[in-house]
Amino acid sequence: MTHARGRQFLHTPGPTVMPDRILRAMDRPALDHRGAEFRNLADACFGGLKRVFQTESPVLIYPAAGHGAWEAALVNTCSPGDVVLMCETGAFSDWWKEMVEAFGITVEYLPGDWRHGADPDAVEAHLAEDKARRIKAVAVVHNETSTGVLSRAAEIRHAIDNAGHPALFMLDVISSLASMDVRVDEWQVDVAVGGSQKGLMLPPGMSFTAVSEKAFRASQSARQSRSYWDWTALLPDGRTPAFTCTPAINLMFGLREAIDMLTEEGLDNVFARHARLAEAVRRAVAAWGLELWSADPREHSNSVSTILVPDGHDANALRACCLDRFNVVLAGGLQRLNGKAFRIGHLGDLNEPMILGTLATVEAALGATGIPHTKGGIVAAIDYLAGE
């Protein structure tokens, strides 16, 4: 039996590395969630999340994974028979589409090749053709975790405005929140969906929804059945968030610590750090002679890179080598990319040595598994970081 020493390098795009400060913050006895101490904790979290989402709108907190926040967005704003315009960008847009359809909501799915983000021109053209204004919402995955492709949210907002369409703008920011610049108010996002286990550096188990005034008004007339997710109960006055069930109390302590850490670093510095580490990964990939799945440099994700291996080679064998021999965890390709690509998550509580260690491991595993490549990826990453 092999005994691993040292810390495992976790480089999936979620869950991400949990810093000791957050682990210590959660390590405490249970607390009365109806008492004054918890109310103060909740107020700090609600207020801090508004800063992270860059919004003045209320942000709701659910004990749930990100899929729960997806469901909340749909059942509070749509009715059976409504139409939602969605953009195909990868596995997660596919899964969100399936959820929409499960509620009896019609999906008009703009096709994509998974290598590009949502096409603003296609969104505008489709909305312009909707003379009857049947489309209730436009739903976009901001950062497609399966492909490492970023959709240009500000341009999608402009597309909706240029078409003069009243549709709600829904944005999944699960793997971009607290990693890349997410501007909910500036982009006039009506429903922004986030999760705890990525840029916020927390365990899985909490999800978030920023709710605009327009979205809250829509919830008053929506006829989809709902109970657990009901914004009327969670946001009685449309402004002040609350809980209708026992919250994830210890995760809330971790959330407050995460918000403090992000505030101390400064959001602009957080975004710059992620951009720097992501570019180091991209320089290594280019030096290896491998192909980044994201085809447009404007849409490269700063949270995760999806990397193709040459035909005839198995990306999962590379991942297994990284884990079994070097105790480094990479993510696999999803759906059509299974076995064809691997993913390096570079978001959350990471620094340069952690990224360089992972890139060195990948380069070693490329050699160990016989995947054709050019040596020197780690040198390219070092040279880039040294020149920054």
Image (cartoon, grey):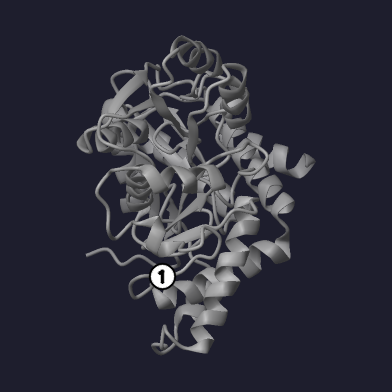
| Residue that lies at the very extreme toward the right in this rendered image | 387
Q: Measuring 45% from the left and 21% from the top, which residue is drawn there?
A: 115
Q: Residue at x 71, y 38 (%)?
A: 383
On screen, 365 above or below 25?
Answer: above
Residue at the disc numbered 1: 243
Q: Residue 159, image x and y in percent?
A: 58, 20
Q: Where is residue 305 in the image (x, y as percent from the top left)?
A: 49, 35
Q: How crowded is mark 1: few (under 14 residues within 10 Å), some or many (20 or more)?
A: some
Q: Is residue 134 above or below residue 139?
A: above
Q: Quadrant of residue 231?
A: bottom left
Residue 285 appears left or right of 220:
right
Residue 182 appears in the picture as rendered: no
Q: In this view, does 230 lie above or below 156?
A: below
Where residue 279 appears, as percent x and y from the top left, is 63, 36
Q: Which of 57 and 248 lies nearest the eye of the viewer?
A: 57
**Which of 147/84 is in front?**
84
- Residue situated in front as seen by the camera: 144 or 194: 194
Q: Choose top left, top right, bottom left or bottom right for residue 106.
A: top left
Q: Quadrant of the N terminus?
A: bottom left
Q: Can residue 59 be seen in this view?
A: yes
Q: Where is residue 310 in the image (x, y as percent from the top left)?
A: 37, 20
Looking at the image, the residue that sits furthest to the front is: 221
Tally the numbered discs. Answer: 1
Quick check: 212 left or right of 228? Answer: right
> From the viewer's perspective, is 102 left or right of 261?
left
Q: In which quarter of the image is the C terminus?
A: top right
Mark 1 lies on a secondary structure that is loop
Amino acid at dot 1 = Phe
